[in-house]
Image (spheres, rainbow, N blue to C red):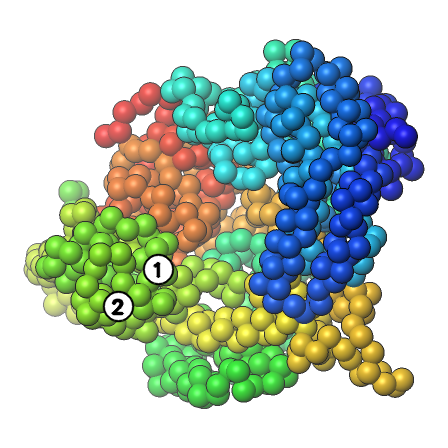
Amino acid sequence: MTWIYGLADVGRNDLALAGGKAVGLAGLIQAGLPVPPGFVLGTDAYGAFAEANGIDRSIVELAVVAPQAAPGDYAAASGRIRALFTGGEMPEDIAAELAAAYGLLGDGNVPVAVRSSATAEDLASASFAGQQETYLNVRGAEALARAVVDCWASLWTARAMAYRAREGVPPGDVRLAVVVQQMVEADAAGVMFTANPANGRRDQVVISAAWGLGEAVVSGTVSTDNLVVDARTGAIVSRQTADKDVMTVYAETGTREQPVAAARRRAPVLDDQAAAGLAAIGTRIAGHFGVPQDVEWARTADGFFILQSRPITALPEPAGDVPDTWPLPYPKGMYFRASIVEQLPDPLTPLFADMIDGAVARSLQALMAGALGKNAIRDGDIGLPTINGYAYYYYRNSGMWRMMAKSPAAFRALIRGEAHMGVAGWREYSHPKYERVVREWSAKPLPEMSGEELLEGVQALLDAGTVYYTAVQSIIPLAATSELSFRAFYDKLVRRDGDPPAQALLLGFDSEPIRAEKSLYDLSGWARSDPALTAALLERPTAELAGCLRTGSPPQGLDDVLWQEWRIAFREHLGLYGHTVYNLDFATPVPADDPATLLETVKFYLRGQGTDPHERQRQLTERREQLTTVMAARLGPRRRAVFFRLLRWAQQTAPIREDALADVGLAWPLLRRMLAELGGRLVGSAVLAGPADVYWLRFQELQAAVDFGLAGTGTRETDAGEVAITGADRPVRAAAVEERKMRWRGQAKAAAPQMLPENRWMERSFGSWMPAGSQHQSGDVIKGVGASSGRVTAGVRVLEGPQDFGSMQPGEVLVARITTPAWTSLFAMASAVVTDVGGPLSHSSIVAREYGIPAVLGTGVATQRLVTGQQVLVDGDAGTVTILPAGASAA
């Protein structure tokens, strides 16, 4: 019997014989594309091995684990099944044919990759890729035989078994073929999408490239250059060249990581010509298969090789016929990424997107009705829809003009604090009401609540947070107007050449973010008083310390009593400030869930870095009072009276804005615990793979899932009685969750326009109050809004979110889409701040001034154009960021 087939001989209908990966590679070879030589050991060989060793029935019996079983049950079953393979022997005829085929690849010691090719893998309708193991740099016939058996056994990893159970795939229906391919001496490798996952455009190819082997690129463990190529012309649409510090290379067996040579770290992996050539290959692959492809590639001295190609299982719909145009859900309206959207820098997860749109519309309508009258806002006038995953404030044109016509009356209502608006409304009504809702739901024990009650609580808390934020929006224009009014008076009638800017008279006041920073500084001061505690905090990994805070166990070698005292103090800090959001989307943990970023700040202060925030505030206050005395002395009685009235108004309002914004996430720790409880129950009911997958459901799916059965019985009631749950019954399949995650990752690569539709009329009409840099900037100078004065030359640190905070180094330029009050601790490390979104009155500008560092905000493209390690000149006065040549020194 023939067990082995050449890859070129596998046909499109040979899935049951050769598995999905082999069928895909065969298609590439038949299309004349460059694929490393190799062969496939068919699924019959897997069956023959199991039968010859008498383990075929045992495998199926052990693999029948209920979909709602605990992870430990899957792990135990997997261990027993894999032991059957380890104890088995490969039949002699299979071993002989395998060795003979291997000998045809080279001299008997040629390095090969041994990859699984499952019968339910690499299909457009599923995301089974990666469930089995791959073995690289295997040398010699004996090692190859062991790797093949290990590959067969990997069909029964706990992860793969649980995934198939959730998808309703019976254990007896799966077989595994094994692809063996000669390893190529890759100088560079990476991944290529033949359609742009950020915007759905099928005429753009997206390439990620790194030095060395490609496995580290696929797993995400190395930094990559990222390019977008026009598929029709081969022109480079955009290029980001990373600082590539490590690369994956061959070891004696397997692979290892090694540092990248200094000369290559910031050098592009692919020049324009090579990128265009690779994109052309990708276009051929997509044309051959008829659908966009996710391609793994490698480059050698002989050119490019294709290692794998599979369909992209999720892509956003193309934007339309007009290049770079984002499709608008409601055409007769205007869209802005401002206000609440500044705390939503990334694409929204599906559950949050569904729930927040209605909540925002309801709360805004109520606020506007109170300020402008009941008829000013009508259903459909306002909302928070998503476009390509990103949240936008939407105002219908007719509703916008009605609101603008009544804006003077609304502003008078703000000043007077009517309709629970303004500072008085926030202090006396909105904040206490929000606290009361959180307190009431906190009193309910989560394990005792039904699924319906948990879902009701999630909605109630989100609504309360949205209503609160809407009320906070009535403070923001007051803070902006007060500062702008004082600045205009100061610049025109007070300031002389050489005088500091008006903002110098607004610094040194307490606010919630500053109090949180001082609290962390004080915690580090306490730790510094005990050498053992200091050593433990500095020497133990941050993840370990976070775990010790969670469990109560002391770090290794530290006295338990001392640790418990410090842990209580740290938890008190979390109780006061742990609800501050990094991202308003509730899928993102808050500090109360994951205190790792706060621990990094404590370590920063323990190392003696940064400045004492108490002393900084004292100096700012002293300077402010001195300047106030000097400036007031220049004025006559009438102007002095106006000066002090405007100054006190600005000084009192700005800190309250920061206090109010810092408490937007007050409900988020409890809300996330409720969703985790729901997610855990859905895992127990075999609906979800993990509790966190709850964020990737649509709201109606979550409602259906709650109705579907949270008891974890594995059955449901029908008119015919109780029946077992099957994969087809589930309200959402695991593959749908994986597709949404993939779509989100693609959308996250996009630069969301600040205003839509993008046209000159919009920029002229609204650019004055919502400044932003152009989305299409090129050249070495990036323009934004100067929000804090000063000039700094330093290296860039691009941060996508709190998961990156630990990489921030003192003296670097902090570059992010946006910063919220939860980012404040990083300002102590930063030499400057640059953001995509924001203006001179946003949180970033206010905190940057307190720290005395330059800030350039609203660039629109900073996170797209800049990469970690680049040297830049940040000019907070001119509002520019200049990219400097490689080798430029910091100043």
**Looking at the figure, which quarter contains the C terminus?**
top left
> Is 102 situated left or right of 135 in this image?
right
Q: Can you give x and y, in whole percent of width and height, for residue 690 in the image? A: 60, 63
Residue 489: quarter of image:
bottom left
Which residue is at the front of the view, 412 or 518? Answer: 518
Q: Look at the image and tell me in which quarter the N terminus lies.
A: top right
Neighbor class of circle 1 (other Cα within 10 Å; few <14, some 14-19, many 20+) is some
Q: Which residue is mark 2?
A: 567
Q: Secondary structure at mark 1?
A: helix
Q: Is residue 461 above or below residue 46?
A: below
Question: Where residue 98 appears, x then y in whole percent?
Answer: 76, 26
Image point (33%, 52%), residue name: 542
Q: Amino acid at mark 2?
A: Arg
Residue 146 visible:
yes
* Numbered tag placed on residue 332 in the rendering: none
- State the residue in front, 260 or 88: 88
Instruction: Residue at 61%, 22% (x, y): give it.
Output: 139
Circle 1: residue type:
Ala
* Left or right: where 512 falls relative to 100: left
Q: Is residue 360 above or below residue 74?
A: below
Specify whether residue 847 is in view.
no
Question: Which residue is depicted at the point 78% across and 48% down?
Answer: 54
Residue 607 horizontal side relative to residue 304, left or right: left
Q: Residue 546: which numbered mark, if any? A: 1
Residue pictured at 77% horizontal, 24% vertical: 96
x then y, percent, for residue 813: 33, 40
Along the polypeptide, which appears first: circle 1 or circle 2?
A: 1
